[in-house]
Image (cartoon, grey):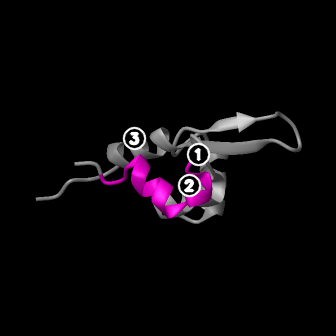
Amino acid sequence: MKLVTIDYINDAFPKSAKSFNLKIKEAAIIIGVHENTLRSWSGKAIGPEYIKVNNGRKSRVLYPKECLINWIEENTVKTM
């Protein structure tokens, strides 16, 4: 059973439903951390995989929905 699905993400962010990626603020909400935490993680190369668009001062970080789902599943601790 998947904890988070593409449909769940699309329902949570209808404006991003047609996109394969989420902005940092949306991704942070999905995984339950502050967006500054996600920025820090990306700078340290930890956390979910992301895409960096345009190098330099105006670069953007986008999180593929499928990568967020995979990261959540891989980091879920199952208890008895």
Q: Residue 33, image x and y in percent? A: 52, 63
Instruction: Answer with mark 2 or mark 3, whichever residue precedes in sequence.
Output: 2
Secondary element type, mark 1 = loop
Amino acid found under the numbered disc labelled 1 = Lys
State left or right for residue 33 relative to residue 7. Answer: right
Separation (CA) of disc 2 from disc 3: 13 Å
Amino acid found under the numbered disc labelled 2 = Ala
The numbered mark at residue 70 is: 3
The numbered mark at residue 28 is: none
Q: Residue 16, image x and y in percent? A: 60, 52
Secondary element type, mark 3 = helix
In this rendering, which labeled residue sits more in front, label 2 or label 1?
1
Instruction: Answer with mark 2 or mark 1, whichever residue precedes in sequence.
Output: 1
Q: Circle 1 sits on which residue?
A: 18
Residue at (69% x, 44% y) in the render = 61
Residue 63 lies in magenta, yes or no? Answer: no
What range of the chain is rendered magenta?
3-17
**Predominant SS of the magenta segment:** helix
